[in-house]
Image: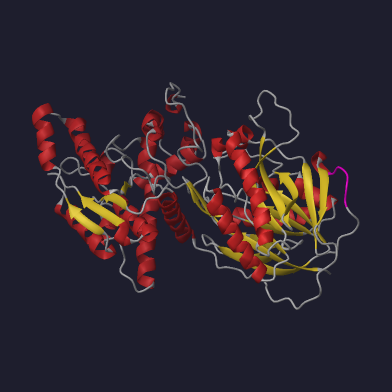
């Protein structure tokens, strides 16, 4: 059987940075060539970054992408890399589609190209366009209608883009019909908890349906609220794993494959009306060689380490790609700000993390002490600025009471943080978690102040679990656990009035989070949640809090998405809305 050395470049890219992304592609192509690869591949839309959102509707950006692709092909040849065929994702437009109502202007396409000998040997567009969760690809793109196949080293390689594997039909059965020896899919599949298990089973299933070895190449890094975790996978025709790349790690997986020899040139129309478009890169098998590279199987991260890693990668990418070098956090001594601080230290380094304790007359000594202890353990920059003089001045002018008095303290802290941010150039991190955001247990322009919310999509019970995991991981490495034990064990409190506890306003978090997971993440209604064993009045009260807090959530900063339905693009509800699930 013919042999093929495949290089899967699991790399990051930045939206809009065509020059920087080009440099990265050239670098990793050079690395692939040095490893003796016969075919190199890069992720979905790697040249433009992903997702480009409404940039796809700008003809200037589309044309810049097309020009960058042509320049990349020429540069690879100029640098002596032209003989290595390279599969690259980019933004294109349809040459043939006629403008029509309901179709995106300019008919942009989520596309990929095969570059060889300084030219674009083949272009194709994504066939299945996702339109769920964070994806709006029907808004942005027109679908491809071909099955692209390239012959490399005497092997026919069918090509696909991300959703082409996730949906039934289309290019997967078409690859079998075309007699492909390898199905290669390039992807920018965002991270979700436990998605790695789903992804592996999907690739196994599709390989069996395609009847050939299947390679799933994934992107890594972060883009706004999305995180890409890598985890590229190669399986044989029977669904057995040949290689699996690390999670959250940039690199190149190179492996030697033995694949069926290509027959006659496939042609015609196959499954889903796809027209085979075939290009011959090299018809003859490569000279026989002793296989050396198996690709390997990287160890999987356990669930808590996986989630924590995603949060670190998300914050690091947001800060770096937006030109921020340091972050600022209000340290209350509580669990949320402590976990955010630990994530920040791991993401940008403790020397670039600035924490401020902002006590009021209601702040307990142990909370002030826990904030200082966190700073000592992590080595972050720390100072204390009391808000009491500011608070007294407001109270003397306004005479606030009750909730207004409580919220004033939070808003003074937010104002203080933003003032320091403006003065010193740090971005503020908002410490709110998903449980609080869900029920509106936060103060607008107070604890919601910030440019990014690292734990925005993390339920409170998971916050505690991640904090325990991070401390345990430190101990196992012989390091100082970053989070004070008291921050983990003491009852949660906003400390805005004497003796205040979160449970004064909210159900126990263990119960609350289970109800929220059903309502927010799974869209179950009141009756279904009650039928699952939860007390009716508690469910009705919780759902009322969620429904009436939409205006707050809409004003919260972006944050790393780790669930199947994070607040933001995943879950879009009207602010002005009189439907109340709790009363129906």
Which secondary structure is most common in the magenta stretch?
loop
On the image, which quarter does residue 75 sit in? bottom right
Q: Position of residue 511 (x, y in %)?
A: 39, 44
Identify the coloring. secondary structure
Q: Front-most of 383 and 333?
A: 383
Is residue 267 visible in the rendered image? The answer is yes
Q: Which residues are magenta?
A: 266-270
Residue pushed farthest right? 264
Name the image quarter holding the N terminus: bottom right
Q: Position of residue 292 (x, y in %)?
A: 69, 76
Residue at the spot 56% in from the left edge and 43% down from the top edge: 51
Residue at the spot 45% in from the left edge and 55% down from the top edge: 313
Residue at the spot 49% in from the left edge and 40% down from the top edge: 521
Residue pushed farthest top? 578
Is residue 501 visible in the rendered image? The answer is no
Question: Left or right of 201: which side holds 443?
Answer: left
Q: Front-most of 425 and 516?
A: 425
Q: Position of residue 193 (x, y in %)?
A: 51, 52
On the image, which quarter does residue 345 sit in? bottom left
């Amino acid at each position: 059987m013919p042999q093929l050395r495949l290089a899967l470049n699991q790399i990051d890219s930045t939206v809009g940075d065509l020059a920087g992304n080009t440099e990265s592609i050239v670098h990793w192509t050079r690395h692939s060539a040095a490893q003796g690869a016969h075919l190199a591949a890069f992720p979905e839309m790697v040249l433009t970054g992903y997702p480009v959102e409404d940039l796809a509707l700008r003809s200037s950006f589309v044309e810049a992408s097309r020009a960058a692709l042509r320049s990349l092909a020429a540069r690879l040849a100029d640098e002596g890399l032209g003989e290595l065929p390279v599969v690259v994702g980019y933004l294109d437009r349809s040459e043939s589609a006629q403008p029509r109502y309901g179709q995106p202007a300019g008919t942009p396409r989520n596309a990929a190209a095969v570059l060889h000998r300084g030219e674009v040997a083949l272009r194709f567009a994504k066939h299945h366009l996702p339109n769920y969760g964070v994806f709006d690809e029907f808004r942005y793109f027109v679908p491809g209608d071909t099955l692209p196949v390239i012959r490399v080293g005497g092997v026919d390689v069918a090509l696909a883009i991300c959703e082409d594997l996730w949906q039934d039909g289309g290019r997967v059965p078409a690859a079998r019909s075309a007699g492909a020896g390898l199905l290669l899919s390039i992807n920018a599949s965002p991270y979700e908890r436990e998605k790695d298990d789903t992804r592996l089973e999907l690739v196994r299933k599709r390989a069996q349906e395609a009847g050939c070895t299947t390679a799933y190449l994934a992107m890594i890094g972060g883009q706004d609220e999305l995180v890409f975790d890598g985890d590229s996978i190669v399986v044989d025709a029977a669904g057995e794993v040949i290689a699996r790349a690390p999670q959250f790690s940039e690199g190149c997986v190179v492996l030697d494959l033995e694949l069926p020899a290509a027959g006659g040139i496939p042609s015609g129309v196959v499954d889903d009306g796809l027209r085979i478009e075939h290009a011959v890169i090299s018809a003859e098998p490569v000279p026989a060689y002793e296989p050396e590279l198996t690709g390997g199987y990287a160890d999987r991260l356990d669930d808590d380490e996986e989630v924590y890693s995603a949060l670190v990668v998300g914050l690091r990418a947001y800060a770096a790609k937006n030109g921020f070098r340091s972050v600022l956090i209000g340290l209350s001594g509580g669990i949320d700000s402590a976990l955010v601080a630990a994530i920040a230290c791991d993401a940008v380094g403790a020397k670039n993390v600035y924490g401020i304790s902002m006590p009021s007359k209601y702040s307990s000594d142990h909370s002030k002490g826990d904030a200082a202890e966190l700073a000592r353990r992590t080595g972050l920059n720390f100072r204390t600025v009391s808000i009491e003089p500011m608070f007294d001045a407001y109270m003397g002018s306004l005479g606030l009471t009750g909730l207004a008095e409580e919220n004033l303290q939070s808003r003074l802290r937010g104002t203080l943080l933003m003032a320091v941010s403006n003065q010193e150039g740090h971005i503020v991190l908002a410490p709110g978690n998903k449980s609080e955001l869900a029920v509106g247990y936060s103060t607008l322009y107070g604890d919601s102040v910030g440019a990014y919310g690292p734990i925005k999509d993390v339920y409170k019970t998971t916050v505690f679990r991640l904090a325990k995991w991070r401390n345990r991981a430190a101990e196992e490495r012989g390091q100082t656990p970053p989070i004070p034990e008291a921050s983990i064990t003491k009852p949660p409190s906003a400390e805005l009035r004497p003796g205040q506890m979160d449970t004064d306003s909210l159900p126990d978090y263990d119960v609350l989070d289970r109800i929220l997971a059903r309502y927010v993440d799974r869209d179950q209604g009141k009756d279904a949640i009650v039928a699952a064993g939860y007390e009716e009045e508690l469910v009705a009260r919780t759902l009322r809090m969620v429904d009436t807090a939409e205006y707050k959530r809409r004003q919260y900063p972006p944050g790393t998405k780790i669930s199947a339905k994070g607040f933001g693009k995943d879950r879009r509800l009207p602010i002005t809305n009189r439907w109340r699930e709790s009363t129906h």
